[in-house]
Image (spheres, grey):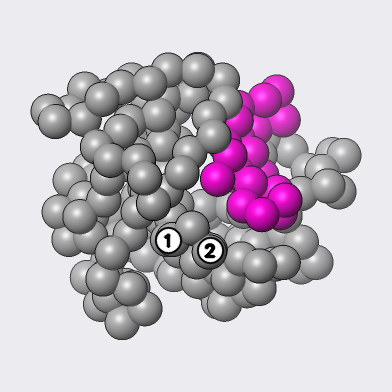
Amino acid sequence: MNIKKENIGTILEFNSTSFLLDPKDLKAKENYTIIFSKLIKEKNFDKIFASPGEYNVGKVFIYSFLNEKDNLTYLFETEEGFLLFSNSLVSEENVKKIKEITQKIEALCFLEKFNFDEILKKFNIDVLVTSLNLNLPNFSKNKGKSFKINLKRSEKQIYILD
């Protein structure tokens, strides 16, 4: 898995499939599958995901769940493992749905501040990817503009995108 922060937004890559997470605008984004963490019904078309559902992009399967206040959570299923992208609390109903899919999530990615402790505990997550400066006990901290992360081998790591 690769993740990097660029002028257009945060880019997440699995198996040469690129996702642009929460871009500020949609101009010249044709090379990416766009992922919005807020429900936007009128923008859910083609390669833009902004509503709950199940999607298949290349070798990546994506589950999207609607939480309170029109916030979305995405579970990416890849050959490397599972990554959860969320900028908000995940509802108990959606935690149950996710647990029906997998008991273990390798990585949590979030770009906005929220209380993620419950998700860490419920899914025993070893890798955090964020734009926030975090300090957690038992986690090593890495800062940079881009990272290549092996989800199966990384343990107790925080990757902070500058």
Task: Give the overall secondary structure of the magenta segment.
Answer: strand
- Which x, y percent locates residue 70? 45, 61
Residue 75 image point, x, y percent: 45, 63
SS label for mark 2: loop
Is 10 left, or right, of 124 in this rendering?
A: right
In the rendered image, the vertical position of residue 128 relative to residue 67, given as above or below: above
- Drawn side of residue 100 relative to residue 45, left or right: left
Relative to residue 153, is residue 83 depicted above or below? below
Calculate the distance from the C-alpha at mark 1 to the C-alpha at mark 2. Answer: 6 Å
Residue at image location 17% in from the left, 46% down from the top: 117
Q: Is residue 35 left or right of residue 52?
A: right
Closer to us: 120 or 150: 150
Q: Are marks 1 and 2 in contact (CB under 8 Å)?
A: yes
Q: Which residues are magenta?
A: 1-21
Name the amino acid, label 2.
Thr
Judge by depth and name the residue closer to the eye, 72 or 96.
96
Mark seen at residue 37: none
Q: Is residue 99 visible?
A: yes
Residue annotated with mark 1: 82
Quadrant the N terminus occupies: top right
Q: Is residue 135 found inside the magenta-colored segment of the image?
A: no
Give above or below for 95 relative to 17: below
Element marked by disc 1: strand
Task: Tell me the tag on residue 78.
Answer: 2
Amino acid identity at mark 1: Phe
Question: Dot 1, crowdedness within 10 Å: few (<14), some or many (≥20)?
Answer: many
Q: Residue at x 28, y 40 (%)?
A: 155
Which residue sits furthest bottom? 100
Residue 18's place in the image compared with 64, above or below, is: above
Percent coordinates x, y for residue 108 in the rendering: 37, 48
The quarter holding residue 25 reads top right
